[in-house]
Amino acid sequence: MGRFYDNNKVYVLGGAQTDFERNWTKEGKGVVALLKEVVTDSLDDVGISYDDIKVLNSENRVACFVGNFIAENYINQGHLGALLTEVNEAFYGVPSARYEAACASSSVALDAAISRLRCGDYDVAIVVGFELMKTVDSMTGGDYLGRAAFYEKEGQGIQLPFPKLFGKLADEYIAKYGLDEQRYLDALARISDINYGNAKRNPLAQTRKWFMDYEQASHRDTETNMLVGGRLGVADCSQVTDGAAVVVLASERYIEEHPGYKENPVVKGFGHRTAPFLFSKKMADNKDSEYVLPWTKQAVDDCYRRSGLTVDDIDCFETHDCFTSSEYAAISAFGLTEPGKEYEAVESGLIAFDGKKPINPSGGLIGCGHPVGASGARMFLDIYKQVSGKAGGYQVKNVRNAMMLNIGGSATTNYAFVVGRL
């Protein structure tokens, strides 16, 4: 069997991201304003006009894929695929639908878009991920996010359920591998420090003007780094973020008609696995595995297999650091260390911006921000930028292939993608 991209390549034309620092509610703007801005910017980036969309639609060659987690709660709005008709009349008649898998919502949308392009149904796919989260207070928002877990058993009536779940992930790591607690917590603090530092290079990152360093991140249960879930402090957490990201993809046929895109990167592989829903069942499931999150590892391995690549071929990574404990788990899932030895990649500088295998040069969810439904698309856009040499101040040198890992819930839905040059 040939590699994934040998059969009907899918090209990445480009896209756009909103400034994750913005609070759209305070600006007096809603979801339509958000979508108009990011969709227009993305089409401008790739050189496709709204008139082009009309022509493509008349030939049934374009479709839209919208990723969002829980707009029904945050902004009292469902039927989200149809919202694009409010962006521009060019979307009248364009097939469009919403995809949802908690924090991996826009990765599901990407997967659907890539599949429809590969099978020849369409030639251009517009993938939109968004979430407006600053419409409610933090406790209400935390309760909404609890729906990404098994709400009845893991979210309902629990304040900030996800910091507690990923605090349990930290507990499991220490117990499973017999880790020195302080060494493990120091590694988490260094991950936080790296991501906040990387965000300062990113002009669209939510925390680019914030101060956070290793010293502050490593001292938990303080006024500036309060404990929020077991051993995890505020500095170990991703952000509450308003934002959107768009990726525009195209088929080989479209590229043959528009050869100016022929040097653009392609999607080289993907992996998708679903773990048991309840966190306790995930932990029971890993008893016979050397990995704490075996389904996450399998999604990454599937992506490597489909791409025909190995970890040695990947020049940088974007991963789902909803908490430092989830990025720590990703290190061995990527194959950068053996399981239980992830701290070695942190302590050695391997995953730092100037290391041999940088993780989250964008700043990640901790530094760049985490508008839940947008995070998969944002990570995908950033690995495209790295491969294309378009990441600006956070560009890693000589990137040929880049990988992303996006998880939904407590690593229940797991998605990996590789984007690279031919």
Image (cartoon, helix red, strand yellow):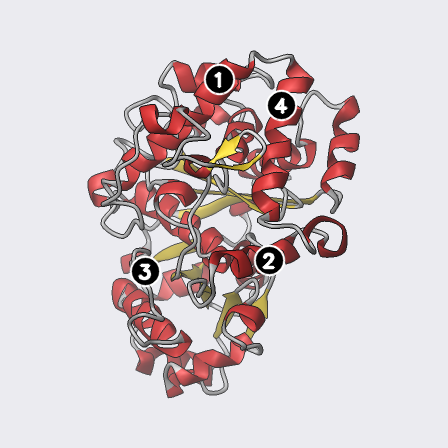
**Which residue is labeled 2 in the image?**
143
- Up the image or down, 302 lies above or below 127; here it is above
The residue carrying pointer 2 sits among few (fewer than 14), some (14 to 19) or many (20 or more) residues within 10 Å by Cα, namely some
Secondary structure at numbered mark 1: helix
- Up the image or down, 369 lies above or below 344; here it is below
Evaluate if marks 4 and 1 touch, with contact meaning CB atoms under 8 Å apart: no
Distance, label 1 to label 3, CA atoms, is 34 Å
Q: Residue furthest left?
A: 393
Distance, label 2 to label 4, CA atoms, is 26 Å
Q: Quadrant of residue 377?
A: bottom left
Secondary structure at numbered mark 2: helix
Sequence-wise, the earlier of marks 2 and 3 is 3
Sequence-wise, the earlier of marks 4 and 1 is 4
Q: Say which quadrant the N terminus sits in.
A: top right
Tag on residue 343?
1
**Which residue is labeled 4 in the image?**
173
Q: Amino acid at mark 3?
A: Ala
Residue 180: horizontal and vertical position, in percent? 56, 11
Secondary structure at numbered mark 3: strand
Residue 419: horizontal and vertical position, in percent? 43, 44
**Which residue is labeled 3 in the image?**
16
Residue 385: horizontal and vertical position, in percent? 31, 47
Label 3 or label 4, whichever lies nearer to me, is: 4
Left or right: where 278 falls relative to 268: right
Q: Is residue 240 visible?
A: yes
Sequence-wise, the earlier of marks 3 and 4 is 3
Q: Amino acid at mark 4?
A: Tyr
Q: Say which quadrant the C terminus sits in.
A: top left
